Image (cartoon, grey):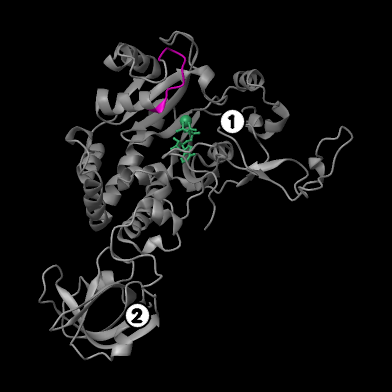
Amino acid sequence: MGPVQIKQLINSTPVGESVEVKGWVRTKRESKNAIFIALNDGSTIHTIQAVAEPGQLPDDLLRLITTGSCIKVTGQLVASLGSGQSVEVKIQDVQVYGTADPEVYPLQPKKHSLEFLREIAHLRPRTNTFGAILRLRHTLAYAVHKYYNDNGFFYLHTPIITASDAEGAGEMFRVTTLDMYNPPKDEAGKIDFKEDFFGRETNLTVSGQLEGELGALALSKIYTFGPTFRAENSNTTRHLAEFWMIEPEMAFFELQDNMDLAEDFVKYVIRYALEHCADDLAFLEKRQAEEEKNKPQNERSMPLLEKLRFVVDSPFERLTYTEAIDILVKSKAHKEKKFQYPVEWGIDLQSEHERYLVEKHFKKPVILTNYPREIKAFYMKQDDESAAAPGPTVRAMDVLFPGIGEIIGGSQREENYEKLLQRVHEVGIEPESLWWYLETRQFGTAPHAGFGLGFERLVLFVSGMGNIRDVIPFPRYPKSAEF
Ligand code: ATP
Ligand code: MN
């Protein structure tokens, strides 16, 4: 189907057969003896070299073949004499599909900063770095579906537009068709959302979890994989306003099963990327080393492939929040007041604390469990009071990764109707707004658990990139929605 891809061509044996290659010119080099054109079609990080004899191509055609132009080369696939590739195309004919005036085409064959490339997100997929990231992203997404399919999970499509603002996971974006300049008002002078499209206030979802639970309490094992939105004004390297989340939800799973699944799942998808994206990962490893070459030795990251193999091969460290606080309080960093935020039982761990545990103390991924009830969502299952902790805790689990901090957040869910209802009241949610969620605890309730993995945080980790805005094709963040 369609033309042969460069990925296939560079792996085929040259038999002098005639081929047609279509792609974008990366470079053109003219020497005394030949003209070399490096062509890439995005199917691989590699280019194929097309070679013409001097004078073979008319000057006015040759002039149009510049970096960024799109061409079709017809020729013969032959063994390459040059180093670095085994085959090349001996040009018979070139057709130019589209030129790219070198005076204005922004992507020239030199190093561009990631900040600059973000401003030309419509063209950055044509760079080596973004080509590699986008192929990696695809492969990881495919591995996610494969993992769950092979393990008896069903892909459940949860809604993007939601009326419940109760999830409490973050600030939401409003969805409305009301006239913002002249909204209908009720008797009290407030905006009358009964007049709105859905007859109520609606938002973009921050998580598919609550609906995911409804699926799990019927199909036993489901997962969602869809876009989620958070209007939090966090200008960090780990937050986007629009990101993709993978949320498995399982009936008859308790906290231990949930942890086992999370660990097995992330290791599987990373292993899958190692097996299927070797060339792109090798490129990204070199890129990272290049990026960090001016850093002092002790601040450089572990080489990318070594880091990924290490994560796949080592068991994640599992401990409770209470044990983690103990480690942090006893740490040198705490005693020397190196932490910006104070540490004591009950705090919501900051990224600096999470990274201390992962990068300095355990030097591997960590799963923290049994967090204080007050800092976690209302739907998490409450621990027995006998739990060894200074205050009430819930069966939460966060998976923390080096360089990232929290990559997964999850828990066993509260299946007891009375206890759940009490938490709903305590955190100030109107029970009526969640009647359908609460009813699942009245009709055939079951122990169940689940978690959410931020897909871009996974891609960030596996690619070794430094900013989450560079691992999604068209990032959405405060003051930016250009493309
Ligand atoms: P954080 O504390 O890092 O802001 P969170 O506690 O708000 O994250 P959850 O509500 O538990 O995150 O969401 C589950 C997962 O979604 C997180 O573990 C993370 O991988 C990812 N995630 C959360 N917020 C964002 C965001 N703004 N951009 C990208 N990924 C995110
Ligand atoms: Mn969380």
Which residues make up the magenta segment? 343-351
Relative vertical location of residue 460 with respect to residue 347 in this rendering, above or below: below
The N terminus: image quadrant? bottom left
Of the two numbered discs 1 and 2 on the same chain, state the one appearing first in sequence. 2
x, y percent for residue 329: 34, 12
Question: Is 297 displayed left or right of 448 in the figure?
Answer: left
**SS at mark 2?**
strand
Q: Is residue 6 above or below residue 386?
A: below
Specify whether 475 is left or right of 45. right
Residue 140, visible in the rendered structure: no
Q: Nearer the viewer, residue 404 or 66?
A: 66
- The quadrant in which residue 407 appears is top left
Residue 234 visible in the snapshot: yes
Q: Residue at x 82, y 35 (%)?
A: 190
Q: Is residue 438 left or right of residue 86?
A: right
Residue under pointer 1:
168
Instruction: Name which residue lies at 33% across and 42% down.
Output: 461
What secondary structure do most residues of the magenta stretch adopt? loop
Residue nearest the observer in this picture, 72 or 432 = 72
Name the residue type under label 1: Gly
Q: Element at badge 1?
A: loop
User: Which residue, as the protein is rendered here, is positioned at the far right?
Assistant: 187
**In the depicted structure, whether residue 150 falls above or below residue 369:** below
- Other-residue count near label 1 (Cα within 10 Å), few / some / many at <14 / 14–19 / ≥20: some
Question: In the rendered image, which residue does mark 2 sit on?
Answer: 71
Q: Is residue 344 magenta?
A: yes
Viewer-nearest of discs 1 and 2: 2
Q: Could you tell me which residue is drawn at 29 percent across and 58 percent down?
A: 111
Give yes or no for residue 464 being in the magenta stretch.
Answer: no
Query: Distance from label 1 to label 2 (Cα)?
Result: 52 Å
Residue 21, image x and y in percent? 30, 79
Q: Nearer the viewer, residue 306 or 329?
A: 329
